[in-house]
Image (cartoon, rainbow, N blue to C red):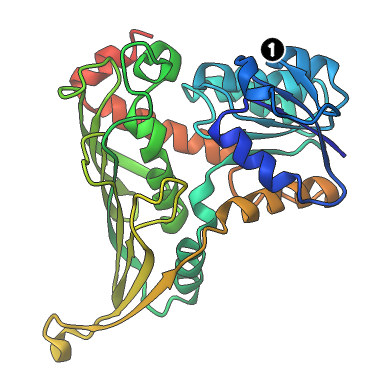
Amino acid sequence: MLIGIVGFGVVGKRRFNIIKSYGGFKISAISDANANNLKDLDDEILKYQDYQDLILSANCQIIFISLPNKYAADATKLALKHGKHVFCEKPPARYARELLSIRSIIKGKPLKLKYGFNHRYHSSVIKASEIIRTKKLGKIVTLRGVYGKSKIISFDQSDWRSKRSEAGGGILLDQGIHMIDLMRFFVGEEFTKIFSIIKNSFWKHDVEDNAFALMETKSGVVAQIHSSATQWKHKFNLEIIFEKGALIFGGILTGSKSYGEETLTIIYSNPDVDKGIPEELTFKYNEDVSWGLEIDEFLNSVKSNKKILHGSIDDAILTMRLIEKIYTSDPNWKKLFYME
């Protein structure tokens, strides 16, 4: 099957390097608005500067989309309408409403659509989900998460990521979406009560540089999240507190290698005996297998007509709706959000 990649920046190139090792699939066309990004490609690969030209002209059955947020939904719709399977990076769109027409396009059709909620495929997350399924630690009581970096990539006045009309949001939508998705994934139900404070007081763009949220499900599970673009030392930390212990994520392997070691610590609690110093077991992971596992699931779902397990259109809509509830739960940010 022939594959086209639209958007050939850092992420598009990473996808390219993984996909090209798969048998039964061939990358036949790539597009990027910057012609310099295409100059080192093999001559047998068709090159386009307009993603629409690739989707409409190249004979591809599968499209990987790695475009700025404002183009993601339109590119996805165009590819699906022309009968192509689609893998689209996060965020899936600027706003949840942009995804509703996409769901109607694929309803009842044998087309596969997957969104890049990459963190579900990290080894620590896979291990944690296995532990949760055993129920040995009991039910989830609370979650606390911090995910932050020193700024959004190219976070300056001239970049599209700094403009709400083009990006849809700032650090919460750009990076915090991974933490939000993991919380939804682990809890297994939606957060319905939300309080938030959204700030853009440091970088002073019209997208947020910090987002704080307190959320609760109908069953009473409470989660806290801080998504930050003023976390000068990059940080990924998620604590899941259960009835009989806890799971602690410390660090995560990324392309930048700036979030520390990827670890998962299991805490077995017996407070009457351990007096707050419980038994712990820590797993360390030295290889980021998430990109390969994610692509593997998508391509296998195309080849064998299997259901998309993670990153479905429903996952995308629910995660985007939750992010929008966080934005609009802050009265000051709600005014700005609905200006678009």
Quadrant showing the N terminus? top right
Image quarter of residue 60: top right
What is the quadrant of the C terminus in the image? Answer: top left
Near-viewer residue (89 or 331): 89
Q: Amino acid at mark 1?
A: Asp
- Does 323 sit above or below residue 79? below
Residue that lies at the very extreme toward the left in this rendered image:
275
* Image spot of residue 132 (x, y percent): 45, 70
Q: Nearer the viewer, residue 191 or 229?
A: 229
- Under tag 1, what secondary structure? loop
Q: Which residue is the site of mark 1?
A: 50
Q: Position of residue 100 (x, y in %)?
A: 59, 24
- Give left or right: position of 116 versus 166: right
Quadrant in the rendering for residue 152: top left
- Find the residue positioned furthest to the bottom: 273
Characterize the local packing of mark 1: few (<14), some (14-19) or many (20 or more) Cα atoms within 10 angstroms: some
Measuring 69% from the left and 12% from the top, which residue is drawn there?
50
Task: From this view, report whether residue 312 is shown above or below residue 333.
Answer: below
Residue at the image point whose x is 76% and y is 45% from the top: 20
Foreground residue among 188 and 158:
158
- Identified at 74% across, 23% down, the residue is 79
